[in-house]
Amino acid sequence: MSEPNVANIRALLEELVRPILKLEPSAPLPWDQDLESLGIDSLTAVDLVDEVATHTGISMPATALLELKTLGDVAAFLEKEAVDPSPRLII
């Protein structure tokens, strides 16, 4: 596991999400589309959160993906955690 940083968070998230969404490598990732409309449900969210933690060491509750509405929101959360990993409550 490499240290997470802002520069590689989006690339990692794209690598983890692209197979879930069954997107071709050349297809643009829909950063601003609602996660639910992309087919990311609660089971998929748990798997994705586990993968993120494995690759970055950043833990987030599985419910965070249900509260963060888009992949862009998830990336922003992870980027903030990479810079300042102090505990915070997600409501």
Image (cartoon, helix red, strand yellow):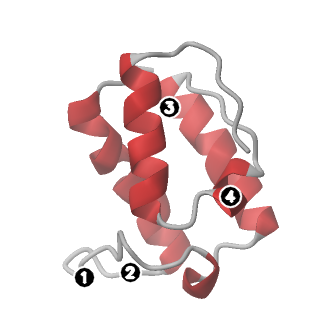
For label 4, the SS is helix
Q: Which mark is drawn over residue 17?
A: none
Question: In screen coordinates, is 69 left or right of 66?
Answer: left
Which badge, 1 or 4, comes first in the chain's sequence?
Answer: 1
Which badge, 2 or 3, comes first in the chain's sequence?
Answer: 2
Measured as percent of width and height from the top left, residue 55 is found at: 50, 31
Measured as percent of width and height from the top left, residue 2 is found at: 37, 19
For label 3, the SS is helix
Q: CB under 8 Å between callouts 4 and 2?
A: no
Q: Which residue is mark 1?
A: 27
Tag 1: amino acid: Ala
Q: Residue at image x 56%, y 26%?
A: 58
Tag 4: amino acid: Glu
User: Where is the C terminus found, in terms of image quarters?
Assistant: top right
Q: Residue at image x 37%, y 34%?
A: 79
User: Where is the N terminus found, in terms of image quarters?
Assistant: top left
Tag 2: amino acid: Leu
The image shows residue 8, relative to residue 49, as above or below, that is above
Residue 84, quarter of the rendered image: top left
Q: CB under 8 Å between callouts 1 and 2?
A: yes
Which badge, 4 or 2, comes first in the chain's sequence?
Answer: 2
For label 1, the SS is loop
Question: In screen coordinates, is 89 left or right of 48?
Answer: right
Tag 3: amino acid: His
Q: How far is mark 1 from mark 4, CA to CA?
A: 26 Å
Residue 39, quarter of the rendered image: bottom right
Q: Which residue is mark 3?
A: 55
Q: Which residue is mark 4?
A: 67
Q: How far is mark 1 from mark 2, CA to CA?
A: 6 Å
Which badge, 4 or 3, comes first in the chain's sequence?
Answer: 3
Q: Which mark is drawn over residue 23?
A: 2
